[in-house]
Image (spheres, rainbow, N blue to C red):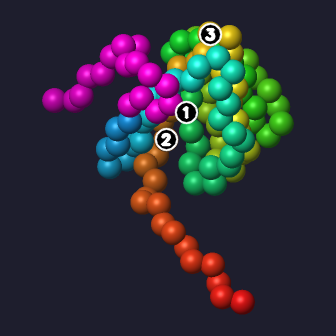
Amino acid sequence: MPEIVDLLAADGRGPLYGTATEDLNVTLLSWAPGDRIAEHVNEERDVLLVVLAGGGTLTVDDAESDLRTGVATVIPKGARRGIVAGPAGVRYLTAHLRRGPLTIERAAAN
């Protein structure tokens, strides 16, 4: 039987819920007013972002878009992206194809 989760009942800030299948990663995130997700690049996967509550600003490759409840967007892999939570904070769900495990690479000796 699939897991059923009430995404609006989870309390707190930051990553509140995550799950993975063989094919998919899903994460629920919640940020307080003014919190920022620093700009970063995901080179591996397109990411679906769906706003469940609140709003804010999404910046993708220097273009700003308003986030609000009910908005969905796909952020392409390789794009530089960041989020700033608005006055009511923001709660959103992300989903993307599952990634392999993280690896640590050693710097080459000079």
Q: Main secondary structure of the magenta part?
A: loop
Q: Split into 4 quadrants, where in the image is the N terminus? A: top left
Q: Depth check: 91 or 25 in front?
A: 91
Which percent across, then down, holds residue 10? Answer: 37, 19
Q: Residues within 10 Å of mark 3 (few under 14, many from 20)?
A: some
Q: Which residue is mark 1?
A: 48
Q: CA distance from mark 1 to mark 3?
A: 22 Å
Name the mark on residue 57: none
Relative vertical location of residue 36 with respect to residue 21 in this rendering, above or below: above
Mark 2 vs mark 3: which is more N-terminal?
A: 3
- Circles 1 and 2, Cβ within 8 Å, touching? The answer is yes
Q: Which residue is mark 2?
A: 96
Q: Which residue is mark 3?
A: 88
> Does dot 1 land on a helix, a strand or a loop?
strand
Q: Is residue 45 visible?
A: yes
- Marks 2 and 3: which is nearer the front? 3
Q: Residues within 10 Å of mark 2 (few under 14, many from 20)?
A: some
> Does dot 2 land on a helix, a strand or a loop?
strand
Q: Depth check: 32 or 7 in front?
A: 32
Q: Amino acid at mark 3?
A: Ala
Which percent across, then down, holds residue 88? Answer: 62, 10
The span picked out in magenta is: 1-17
Q: CA distance from mark 1 to mark 2?
A: 6 Å
User: Is residue 98 found left or right of 61 in the rendered image?
Assistant: left
Q: Residue furthest left?
A: 1
